């Protein structure tokens, strides 16, 4: 973040539009990215298909013109396509498959009151953070590294406390609920023992103090312990597949069918105005309109390893633990475990993980110095009792609950997650090698995968494109031919170290090959005056942030054909395109300034999800896979990764590669792309704002 105050109109008027890459460049880069992943015959066939698609006057050019028209008429030509394809069309359950978690430093709670006090402190902190958002007083995020200082789009921040994902049979809907900047009343939902309670945190325009919040949370703890008032664990339904949850939600809202339990009614209930309809709709409405959830979890008797904590925050431990103590449709869920396991779960369609990391780091800093603030604050004289959310359930709903509980149980049993801290060195040593830490780690991941599976696969590395209006991410395809040549050489005991080092440097530079055309296209614009750099990291960074990579463009062409009701182009029916989008290695760098880390599951059943966090003197990895796959094993991948990182360092030392850190070595964060730079290079900022590609 910077120290520049954000104006209310900043995002909508000062951010440049996302550029539209040249069709020829995208098709050429696509072929370069897939050539080494296919046999010669398979590639020749795909090359001919691509050539037919890109022929002058052909389907590719027609779709390109339509995309250009869309770019001229909209703020961001790919955002709706990307959001649907990446998230809203996905029918898989949100936990593990989609929603990442951020795990906080472990807390030492020796009594229940300590976790309650921590939760009150946390709530006070995020209310303070929200007040900055509402006042547009949150400093503008700025880029770091070679292009330090250019502002980044802030729209994702506004969704932290306003977004909600509504399930649908075929496609979900992302809703942003905006209210007054200074509302009379605002509430959060507190989850305890799989029950939900609406807690007003702003009453008559006044925020509750930490002491008031603690008092209210203590009331909720008592209310949740009342077995006579216990409600069904409806939160389990949100952990199910999206189509299954959509069906169950409709049942909840309609209230049809015979009732069971102490609220049983004879026969069927008319849909309009039925008790179930009004009660359930009211509870759903409170959940959908809340700022966020605070989940007060029961503790776990097991050892609180990093891997165990990651799993607990991701899925809650199933129906027998805290699995129903979540509402996965809400954008932000803070988790406070009685055992000190704390963190936050993110509904990923609303924003990227780095946005929530910034919020979390603000909270942790706030909580260190907040006690003095709460002493001075004036409380609310009469605190209303928190409201228990009630549900009237038919046998159909109970059947849905049983099915949801079973599927969640199988999902969490299937998860194989290993959080690993590599302590031999960190990003400072990598910088001393005059290499980008991100590129270095990506090559290490390629080496680890090859040693486990003896082949290269399509790899996804998310890259922020927030320099543009409404920008989210594109993909750095880091499984390059040069990386494959290096990892193959590392597997050859007869290969000389000098040759291995040559190939290693080529692998680090390989992303330049895919980025150079992107960068040259960017530099060729007459109104752009940025000095060209020879550093390989610079071109990697350009590809990551300038919106000229291939994945979003290919997606736009495919979806535009669908919008135009054209026949699906042959290029998108080709097996090579399918394989190129089957990311058996899905990676993301989510750096943090404090002792916390991010984790998520794989995106395909036989793949790995790897989130990494480079620190000065160590590297943190979260490696996830599914146990049901006979092709993956997280512990074996971690062992291979550890060995590879050691071998790469040893290789550099043997070849006397250690040097002083250079400016190019600061290119370490393509995913987050957020810095603390205090002096933005104004000429560059103005240039970026004038882009009219």
Image: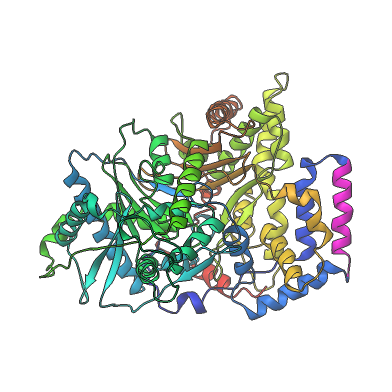
The dominant secondary structure in magenta is helix
Can you say whether 273 is above or below 643 in the image? below
80 and 55: which one is in front?
80
Using the rendered view, name the quadrant where residue 565 is placed.
bottom right
Residue shown at 51%/79% (left/top)? Answer: 13
Place of residue 22 in the rendered image (x, y in percent of width and height, measured from the top left): 75, 66
- Where is residue 121 shown, x and y percent of the image? 22, 55
Q: Verify whether residue 264 appears in magenta.
A: no
**Where 7 sits versus 456, above or below?**
below
Q: Observer-nearest residue: 214 or 245?
A: 245
Using the rendered image of the protein, determine whether residue 533 is visible from the camera's viewpoint: no
Q: Which residue is drawn at 12% across and 67% down?
A: 379
Quadrant that contains the C terminus: bottom right
Task: Pick whichever, 687 or 206, lies toward us.
Answer: 206
Res. 482 visible in picture: yes
Residue 53 among magenta residues: yes
First to last magenta residue range: 41-56
Q: Looking at the image, is 19 positioned above or below residue 100?
A: below
List x then y, in percent, for residue 106.
Answer: 30, 40
Q: Which residue is drawn at 37% across and 52% down?
A: 233
In the picture, residue 478 is in which quadrant?
A: top right
């Amino acid at each position: 973040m910077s120290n520049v105050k954000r104006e209310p109109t900043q995002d909508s008027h000062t951010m440049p539009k996302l550029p539209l890459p040249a069709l020829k460049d995208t098709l050429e880069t696509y072929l370069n990215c897939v050539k080494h992943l296919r046999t010669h015959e398979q590639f020749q066939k795909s090359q001919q298909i691509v050539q037919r698609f890109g022929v002058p006057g052909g389907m590719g050019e027609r779709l390109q013109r339509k995309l250009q028209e869309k770019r001229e008429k909209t703020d961001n030509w790919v955002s709706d396509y990307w959001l649907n394809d990446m998230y809203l069309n996905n029918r898989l359950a949100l936990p593990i498959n989609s929603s990442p978690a951020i795990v906080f430093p472990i807390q030492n709670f020796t009594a229940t009151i300590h976790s309650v006090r921590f939760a009150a402190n946390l709530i006070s902190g995020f209310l303070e953070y929200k007040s900055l958002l509402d006042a547009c007083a949150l400093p503008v995020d700025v880029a770091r590294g070679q292009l330090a200082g250019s502002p980044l789009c802030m729209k994702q921040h506004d969704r932290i406390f306003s977004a909600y994902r509504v399930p649908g049979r075929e496609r979900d809907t992302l809703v942003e609920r905006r209210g007054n900047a200074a509302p009379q009343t605002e509430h959060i939902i507190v989850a305890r023992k799989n029950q939900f309670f609406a807690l007003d945190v702003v009453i008559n325009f006044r925020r509750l103090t930490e002491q008031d919040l603690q008092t209210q949370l203590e009331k909720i703890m008592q209310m949740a312990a009342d077995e006579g008032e216990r409600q069904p664990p409806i939160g389990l339904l949100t952990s199910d597949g999206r189509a299954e949850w959509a069906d169950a939600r409709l049942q909840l809202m309609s209230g049809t069918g015979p009732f069971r339990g102490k609220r049983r009614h004879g026969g069927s209930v008319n849909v309009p105005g039925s008790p179930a309809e009004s009660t359930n709709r009211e509870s759903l409405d409170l959940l959908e309109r809340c700022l966020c959830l605070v989940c007060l979890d029961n503790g776990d008797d097991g050892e609180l390893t990093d891997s165990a904590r990651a799993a607990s925050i991701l899925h809650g431990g199933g129906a027998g633990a805290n699995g129903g103590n979540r509402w996965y449709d809400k954008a932000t869920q803070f988790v406070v475990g009685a055992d000190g396991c704390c963190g936050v779960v993110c509904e990923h369609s609303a924003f990227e993980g780095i946005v929530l990391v910034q919020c979390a780091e603000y909270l942790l800093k706030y909580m260190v110095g907040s006690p003095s603030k709460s002493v001075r604050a004036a409380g609310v004289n009469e605190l209303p009792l928190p409201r228990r959310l009630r549900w009237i359930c038919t046998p159909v709903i109970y059947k849905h609950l049983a099915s949801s509980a079973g599927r969640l149980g199988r999902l969490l049993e299937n998860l194989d997650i290993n959080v690993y801290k590599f302590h031999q060195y960190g990003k400072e040593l990598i910088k001393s090698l005059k290499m980008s830490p991100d590129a270095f780690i990506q090559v290490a991941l390629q080496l680890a995968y090859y040693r486990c599976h003896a082949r290269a696969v399509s790899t996804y590395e998310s890259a922020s494109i927030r320099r543009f209006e409404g920008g989210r991410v594109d993909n750095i395809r880091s499984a390059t031919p040069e990386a494959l040549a290096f990892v193959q050489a590392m597997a050859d005991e007869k290969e000389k170290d000098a040759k291995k080092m040559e190939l290693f440097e080529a692998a680090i530079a390989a992303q330049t090959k895919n980025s150079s055309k992107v960068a040259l296209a960017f530099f060729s614009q007459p109104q752009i005056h940025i000095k060209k750099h020879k550093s390989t990291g610079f071109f990697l960074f350009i590809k990551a942030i300038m919106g000229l990579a291939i994945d979003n463009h290919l997606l736009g062409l495919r979806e535009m054909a669908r919008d135009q009701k054209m026949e699906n182009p042959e290029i998108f029916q080709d097996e090579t395109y399918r394989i190129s989008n089957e990311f058996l290695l899905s990676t993301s760098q989510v750096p943090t300034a404090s002792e916390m880390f991010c984790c998520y599951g794989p995106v395909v059943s036989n793949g790995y999800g790897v989130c990494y966090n480079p620190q000065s003197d160590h590297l943190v990895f979260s490696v996830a896979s599914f146990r049901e796959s006979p092709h993956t094993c997280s512990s074996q991948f971690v062992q291979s990764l550890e060995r590879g990182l050691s071998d790469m360092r040893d290789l550099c030392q043997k070849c006397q590669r250690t040097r002083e850190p250079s400016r190019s070595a600061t290119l370490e964060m393509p995913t987050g792309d957020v810095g603390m730079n205090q002096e933005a290079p104004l000429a560059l900022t103005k240039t970026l704002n004038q882009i009219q590609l």
